Image (spheres, rainbow, N blue to C red):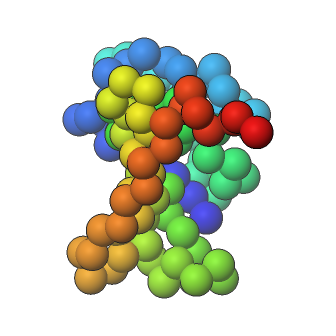
Amino acid sequence: MSIRIETDRCSGCGRCCEVCPGNLIRRSADGKADIRRRQDCWGCTSCLKECKTGAILFYLGADIGGRGSVLSVSQKGDIKIWSVTDPGGNVQKIAVNSKESNQY
């Protein structure tokens, strides 16, 4: 499993750099996020959850049924939208209200 950072969507806020437990994400010379060694990514998705612009894509491996699917997260207010795009281009979305998600 690995992530890819789409620099054209990156705002350069640095939140992904701060939350990466492996210290793998840094800012490049232009201030955009860049992953040092993709193969070292733990797949924790911390960076994905912090990215407000949807610039970070997480590739789901075939070992967990992903068949090359891509997971991305975008946010509109308190709503996080988790999108899974399969290799055929089909998209499934799940919307989660962050204010209500931890209520028991």
Q: Residue at x 26, y 34 (%)?
A: 9
From this viewpoint, is residue 73 visible?
no
Is 23 left or right of 92, judged from the image as shown?
A: right
Q: Position of residue 53 (x, y in %)?
A: 33, 32
Number of numbered markers:
0
Q: Position of residue 63 (x, y in %)?
A: 66, 82
Given residues 19 and 32, the one toward you in this image is 19
Quadrant of res 100: top right
Horizontal placement of 66 versus 63: left or right?
Answer: left
For residue 91, say whether it is visible: yes
Residue 54 in the image: state x and y as whole percent.
36, 40
Q: Quadrant of residue 46?
A: top right
Viewer-proximal residue among 78 and 49: 78
Report the residue at 45% width, 77% height from top.
Answer: 68
Which residue corresponds to the image point at 50% horizontal and 56% vertical from the top-left? 58
Q: Is residue 18 above or below residue 90?
A: above
Q: Is residue 89 above or below residue 97?
A: below
The N terminus - image quarter: bottom right
Name the residue nearer the viewer: 64 or 22. Answer: 64
Q: Position of residue 32 (x, y in %)?
A: 37, 24
Q: Residue at x 62, y 46 (%)?
A: 45
Residue 52: quarter of image: top left
Tell me if 27 is positioned left or right of 38 in this view: left
- For the C terminus, the image quarter is top right
